[in-house]
Amino acid sequence: MGKRLKKLKKIRLHHEGTHTLVWGALGLTALNLAALMLFECKTVFQVCLLVSIVLYLVLVNFFQCPIRIFSGDTERVVVAPADGHVVVVEEVEEREYFRDKRIMVSIFMSLFNVHANWVPVDGKVKLVRHQDGNFHKAWLPKASEENERSTVVITTPDGRDILVRQIAGAMARRIVTYTKEGEECFIDEHLGFIKFGSRVDVYLPLGTDVKVSLNQKTVGNETIIAKLSKI
């Protein structure tokens, strides 16, 4: 494998989380001070403090944008764009861009997953499009077509288009996409971020060798979800 160019966007905590983390820290601190002063029983304060620490750690984990380096050969490889678990692996009719049959692999992110998203293939960004919509629960099939979403189409070096769709869930109210039309993109780069429960769909050409199964856990930029066929 030759040396690849990498334009890593060095993000540790997404700026979308700044407001939540700051106000969350202030609110939990005030709550714990109130528990300390209002209740003579120290157990109340200790329980409140423990719950607050756990809750805040969940928030910090949620807003991480970890930098991960894929260690394998990237030729024809499609890596997981998100942490989570696989909820769909099936042949579907993609109606918005391709308007033909594709293999869809869908990864659902729970509240406890890191919500940073990664570029799944090396290539060039052909399309970036944001669409407003509803906020159905992210694991429902209709979420792919009816929820607020951001669509990114990447053309691989051998000329095949791979579609990645970030989908907002019932709690999500903010989708951020970093990629820009016309720029080169690479595995290892951050594709974007979705605030709170959501999913990412990947549409692959027919004949692609899918490497994951339903309910399998995925690690963004580490788990290989598919291998494109040779042309």
Image: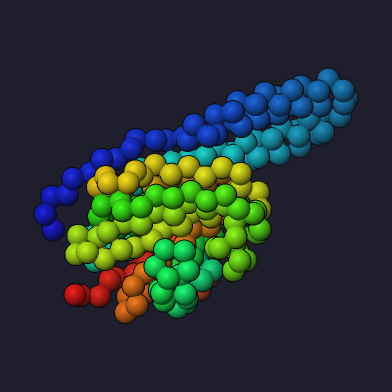
Image spot of residue 17 (x, y percent):
55, 34
Image spot of residue 148 (x, y percent):
57, 52
Image spot of residue 115 (x, y percent):
50, 47
Q: Is residue 231 above or below residue 48?
A: below
User: Could you tell whether 124 is left or right of 127 in the image?
Assistant: left
Q: Is residue 78 above or below residue 83?
A: below
Closer to the camera, 196 or 219? 196
Residue 59 in view, yes or no = yes
Task: Choose top left, top right, bottom left or bottom right for residue 155.
Answer: bottom left
Closer to the camera, 9 or 149? 149
Residue at screen point 54% across, 68% down = 87
Q: Is residue 179 above or below residue 1?
A: above
Residue at screen point 34% across, 63% down = 162
Q: Is residue 195 above or below residue 107?
A: above
Residue at screen point 87% across, 26% down = 39
Residue 110 in view, yes or no = no
Task: Choose top left, top right, bottom left or bottom right for residue 35.
Answer: top right
User: Could you tell whether 208 is left or right of 140 in the image?
Assistant: left
Quarter of the image containing the N terminus? bottom left
Residue at screen point 70% across, 29% down = 28
